[in-house]
C-alpha cells in the first residue's frame, strides 16, 4: 500500500538560502483586518504550527512580512505535553506526529491547539499589534478522552470542539470565554469501537482519527476517521440542534470508495473537498441533515499519499497535498476535475500541513523547514530553513492569523 512509504521518507536537513523579495498578489481592497487596526495584505500577520514535544509543547509563531515572506520563529508554551503516533512497526513516526489535519486552529484573535500527551486543549489570544505574540487564556482544558489531535471552532456558536484519537476516542466541546478560556459543555461523546478501536498513542495512518471541523454555516460538525480498506472510512456528522453538539444526533457516513479520509476543506457553504491517500479526492455535499452526498470522486494516478487539503477561492482551486513527494494536485473547485500538479524542488521531500493566505501557500516540508509557494505563478518564493531550531519529528499543524 502506498502509505507504507511514509516511515521511509528522507528527512535530511537541507540548508538553502531564502529567495529575494517578491510581490505576490495582494488581497481585495479593505479585506484584511477590518476592525482590528491592521493594514491590508500581510500587515501584522503570522503563521503558526505546533511543536508537539513530549517534554513540553509550544506554538511556533513566524512573522509574515509585507511581501509575504516569513521570519523570526519563536515559541510560546501551550501548558501541556505532546505525544507521537506510531507507525505499522510500532515505532514513533518520523514526521506528521498526529497523522491529522487542524491540530492548530485560528479564528479572529483566537488560537486553539491540542496537547496529546496530557489530554488537554489550549486556547490563546493573538496580540492585535503583533500577531507573533500569543497569550494563553485560562488553563488548558481536559479533552474528555485520550490523545487529542485536531481542534476546531465556530464563531457563530462560540463553541470549540476537539477530536480525541486514542483508546478513549471521541469528541468534546467547549464554550469559549475570552477571559476564562475553555468551559466544557455537555458530555464527552465517545466513539463506538466500530468507528475507532485505537490504542494510546494510536497507530496509523490506517484506522486513526483525522480531523474535526464545522461547516461554514455552523449547522453541522464533521469528523474524518480513517479505515483500512475501501468502504471502511468514516465521515461522522453531528447536526447542530439548539446550538449544541450531542451524541443523539450522530450520523456515520460511509462510502464504498472511501478508505482513509485524511483531510477536508469547504469550497462553499455546502460542499467539502476531502482527500484520501488510498485513492485521491472527493467532493461531498453536506446538508444540514448531516447525511452526506458524494458528488465527485477522482482517482489521482500519480499520487503517493495525498494527506492534506486546501482551497484558494481566488483561483477557484482545491489542492490535494502529497506527503510522499513535493507535489500539489490541483482541482477545479466547481466541477471537481483534476487539472494538474506542481510543487517546489524535489529536494524538499514531501509537503505536510499547509495554509493559504493572500495567494501564497505555507507548507511544512519533509526537510527541516517551511516552503512558501505562489499559487498563481506555481513558483517557489521562499524556503525558510529551521535546521537547528528544533526537532522536525515534533512539528505539525499549520494556521495563519486572520
Image (tube, rainbow, N blue to C red):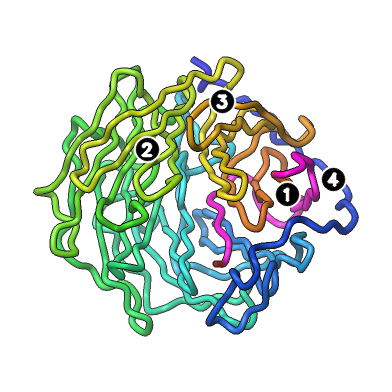
Residue at mark 2 to residue at mark 3: CA–CA distance: 33 Å
Residue at mark 4 to residue at mark 3: CA–CA distance: 33 Å
What residue is disc 3 on?
A: 338
Residue at mark 1 to residue at mark 2: CA–CA distance: 31 Å
Where does the image place residue 45, in percent across and percent down from the top left? 65, 69
Where does the image place residue 129, in percent across and percent down from the top left? 63, 83
Quadrant of res 180: bottom left
* First of labels 1, 4 by sequence position: 4
Task: Give the side of residue 253 with respect to residue 66, left or right.
Answer: left
What residue is disc 4 on?
A: 15
Determine contact: label 1, label 4, CB under 8 Å: no
* First of labels 4, 3 by sequence position: 4
Q: Name the secondary structure under disc 2.
A: loop
Where does the image place residue 75, in percent across and percent down from the top left? 62, 67
Q: Nearer the viewer, residue 286 or 195?
A: 286
* First of labels 3, 1 by sequence position: 3
Q: Is residue 142 above or below residue 260?
A: below
Task: Give the side of residue 97 with respect to residue 343, left or right.
Answer: left
Amino acid at each position: 500500500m502506498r502509505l507504507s512509504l511514509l516511515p521511509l521518507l528522507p528527512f535530511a536537513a537541507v540548508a538553502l538560502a531564502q529567495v529575494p523579495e517578491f510581490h505576490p498578489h495582494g488581497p481585495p481592497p479593505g479585506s484584511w483586518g477590518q476592525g482590528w487596526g491592521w493594514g491590508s495584505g500581510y500587515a501584522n500577520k503570522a503563521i503558526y504550527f505546533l511543536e508537539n514535544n513530549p517534554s513540553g509543547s509550544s506554538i511556533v509563531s513566524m512573522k509574515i512580512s509585507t511581501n509575504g515572506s516569513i521570519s523570526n520563529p519563536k515559541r510560546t508554551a501551550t501548558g501541556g505535553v505532546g505525544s507521537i503516533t506510531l507507525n505499522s512497526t510500532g515505532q514513533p513516526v518520523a514526521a506528521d506526529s498526529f497523522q491529522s489535519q487542524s491540530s492548530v486552529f485560528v479564528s479572529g484573535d483566537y488560537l486553539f491547539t491540542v496537547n496529546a500527551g496530557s489530554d488537554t486543549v489550549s486556547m490563546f489570544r493573538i496580540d492585535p499589534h503583533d500577531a507573533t505574540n500569543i497569550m494563553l487564556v485560562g488553563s488548558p482544558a481536559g479533552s474528555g478522552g485520550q490523545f487529542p489531535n485536531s481542534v476546531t471552532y465556530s464563531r457563530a456558536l462560540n463553541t470549540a470542539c476537539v477530536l480525541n484519537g486514542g483508546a478513549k476516542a471521541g469528541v468534546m466541546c467547549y464554550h469559549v470565554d475570552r477571559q476564562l478560556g475553555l468551559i466544557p459543555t455537555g458530555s464527552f461523546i465517545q466513539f463506538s469501537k466500530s468507528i475507532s478501536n485505537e490504542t494510546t498513542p494510536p497507530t496509523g495512518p490506517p484506522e486513526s482519527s483525522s480531523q474535526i471541523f464545522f461547516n461554514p454555516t455552523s449547522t453541522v460538525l464533521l469528523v474524518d476517521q480513517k479505515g483500512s480498506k475501501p468502504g471502511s472510512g468514516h465521515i461522522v456528522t453531528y447536526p447542530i440542534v439548539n446550538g449544541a453538539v450531542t451524541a443523539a444526533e450522530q450520523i456515520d457516513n460511509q462510502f464504498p470508495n472511501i478508505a482513509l479520509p485524511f483531510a477536508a476543506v469547504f469550497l462553499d457553504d455546502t460542499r467539502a473537498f476531502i482527500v484520501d491517500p488510498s485513492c485521491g479526492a472527493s467532493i461531498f455535499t453536506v446538508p444540514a441533515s448531516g447525511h452526506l452526498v458524494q458528488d465527485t470522486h477522482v482517482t489521482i494516478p500519480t499520487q503517493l499519499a495525498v494527506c492534506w487539503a486546501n482551497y484558494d477561492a481566488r483561483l477557484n482551486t482545491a489542492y490535494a497535498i502529497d506527503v510522499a513527494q513535493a507535489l500539489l494536485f490541483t482541482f477545479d473547485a466547481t466541477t471537481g476535475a483534476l487539472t494538474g500538479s506542481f510543487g517546489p524542488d524535489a529536494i524538499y521531500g514531501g509537503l505536510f500541513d499547509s495554509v493559504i493566505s493572500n495567494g501564497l501557500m505555507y507548507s511544512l516540508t519533509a526537510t527541516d523547514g517551511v516552503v512558501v509557494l505562489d499559487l498563481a505563478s506555481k513558483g517557489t518564493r521562499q524556503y525558510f530553513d529551521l535546521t537547528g531550531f528544533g526537532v522536525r519529528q515534533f512539528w505539525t499543524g499549520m494556521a495563519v492569523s486572520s
